[in-house]
Amino acid sequence: MTDAITAAGLTKRFGDVVAVDDLSLSVPFGTVYGFVGPNGAGKTTTLQILSGLLDADAGTARIDGVASTEREALTDVLGYLPAEAPLYDELTGREQLRYAAQFRRLDESGRVEEALERYGLADAADRRTGGYSTGMRRRLGLAQATLHDPAVLLLDEPLNGLDPRAIRTVRQLVADASDDGTAVVISSHDLATVEAICDRVGIASDGRLVAEDTPDKLGETVDDSLETAVLELTDA
Amino acid sequence: MSRETLGDTLLVARLYLLRAWRRALDNPRTLALRVGFLVALWLYIVLGDAGQPPSEIEPETLRELLRGAAAGAWLLFAVTAAAGTPTAARSVQGSPFLLRSVGLRPTLWGTVLGTYARRLAIFSAFGAATALALLWGLDAPARNPLLFLVLLVFSLSAELAGMAARLAVAAANITPGGAGKVLLGGVGVTVLSLAAGYPEETIVLLSRLPVAAFGEVFAAGVPGVEPNRTLVAVATAGGVAGSLALALTVEQLALRSWFTGGSRERVDTERTRIDDLLGRVGVTGPTRAVAWRLWLQSRRRPLVVGLLAVPTLIVGLALVDPEGTDIPLFPLVVGAYAVWMATVAVGLNPLSSEDDTLPHLLSASGTEIVRGYALTTVLIGAPVIVASVLLAGALVGPVWLTVPALLLSLLVLVGVVPAALAIGFVLPQVGALEHTVDGPIAPGKFAILAHSVVLCLLAAPAALSLLFADSLPLVAVFAGIGVTVLAAPLVGVLSLRVAAGRLDGMTLG
């Protein structure tokens, strides 16, 4: 398997704060990679750098062979869902996805309707997104991020605010995408779900990657679960 | 720009316009106010004597005035554009969506295009309405057909210059600290005030700037003034070429500054002192929480810099001209300005940054919350008013007016602060603001207008009485002062009730 994501020596400072500190990782195609750690560990900043929305102070990152600084080229290969889904409150769900499809020159009606059905938003498609619940916003954000079938999918806290049915939908989506060869990176605090769906897990703390392995092996290092491993390895 | 990029840019502009249109329809009251303002302006232009030069002004003087005014307007546009330019990708609403879908160029220029398309629509409606009035035979002022094009180049070049300047500062990573902001604000307010105090010299100075050439076009319809058409053509051509160069510069600078992420705010334990202080003087509960939170916000806001810079202005004016300026009742005018600035800076847009805390805010009593806002505005405004008026009276004069001006200003503050809060709750500027957006959290234009009217109405009886004290009977002078003295607290009490009632009636839906 070739690597969909390669990052080497990523470093990002905000004034005196070192958000990401010499972080390196690689994620092969067809892999679901869990990115876990406490708040402020640098997960979101790392995903922002990988998505090309933030410049690193040092280090390089490539997504499907495209440098993260080549933002135009990155649009075709990458799907990114930030922690706050980037939706416009004034648009309906259908309009939001139609714009996304038009920007990416996709078959508008077919893709949009399919995505609305897939994410359970068909009934609410003509309602403004400003009136959507948290879970509906996450699902619409996911639909938007995956509309163009990207080779790499970066999901920042995709499970936040979702009910069990929606979580199952997301898990199925991630599994399907992975089966299709997509590399998926999920940042999450939901360790049970991460343990269940991720092939590999990276544990971040203070901007560094302190451990990386399969969920089972990470659990074995502390003779317990992934949750215990995360708690012990990030207990600074 | 490739065909694809152009298509994406147009699509972003269309998206921008659709959203702006829906926001306008969602706020029918604000829309009605705006339409009303435009209709009133149109009536003034078509039916009034706007555009007719005052007969006592010499044509050449008028021409210089037009040139100076054009240069002043250009600078104002540039500064306004600079203030509203996003310096980080996160400041552009929906940026993760737009930047990840179409890239920087369509995101940047599509938004600019959308803004201009909206303005063009308003200008066109205005032009069509004026033309219609002409067909009906109304005596509308003559208009040069090229005026529209020149105006477009004029405003576009100013906005791009402002954007480039702001992005250049951001790209150079220049972030002034608290003292630096106060200093910059002080310099800005001093320059503006000197310009207001010395209008003739300012007009002469401005009319010598290259952008003053745009003013020639306005001279086209003025009897007795022959505009320099060559200069207009050169200015327009230069404006087009300059705008293209500026556009390229803006794009490059945005590329350098938008993705740096800026710097995160440091924890500043010194900020908790005001909270302790409030507790020590017996301010508790929601009032204390709101006051402290507002204090934290207001300390970060460049708007406050203008307020704090008033004493600097007074000292500056006194140093430049110890005999005082031509502004009558100078200490009172300065006091009224300090009242205006205090309420605009702090009290007029109370819900501006409350997006994340609204549920907590709305669960408390409206009266207590409003008291918190009022307390902060008065705490910040009162010392500035005292300092400003005392300095104005001592250094510029007239000295006899110092104490009356101080008392009247503080009294007007008592009335205007609750009125500003009530206006702020009725006309909040919340929708367009997010906690991720950088730049000042400014009140809406109509809120500022309404608040200014209230301030003028409250201060006017006393100010006019004092201004014409020599020609009015003593009883009339005291009666005028008495009206302000009685009206200010009355308006304050009534406004407090309105503001509290409005807040109590608010829901998150």
Image: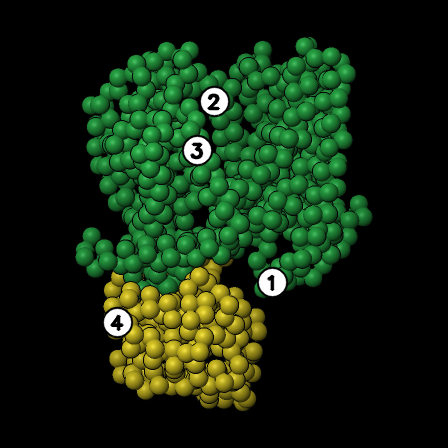
Chain colours: A yellow, B green
The Cα–Cα distance between marks 3 and 2, rounded to whole angstroms, is 30 Å
Between B356 and B28, the one nearer to me in the picture: B28
Q: Earlier in the sequence, mark 1 or mark 3?
A: 3
Q: Position of residue B290 (x, y in %)?
A: 68, 52
Q: Indicate the position of residue B404 as horizontal and vertical percent values.
A: 73, 21
- Residue linked to disc 1: B508
Instruction: Answer few, some or many: residues within 10 Å of disc 1's Cα (few below 14, many 20 plus, some between 14 and 19).
Output: few
- Residue linked to disc 2: B195
Q: Neighbour class for label 4 at 10 Å: few (<14), some, many (≥20)?
A: some
Counting from the top left corner in percent of width and height, residue B242 is at 25, 36
Chain where mark 1 sits:
B
Provide the secondary structure element on which disc 2 rests. Answer: helix
> Which amino acid, mark 3?
Leu
Amino acid type, label 1: Leu
| Left or right, B369 with reference to B93 | right
Label 3 close to label 2 by CB (< 8 Å): no
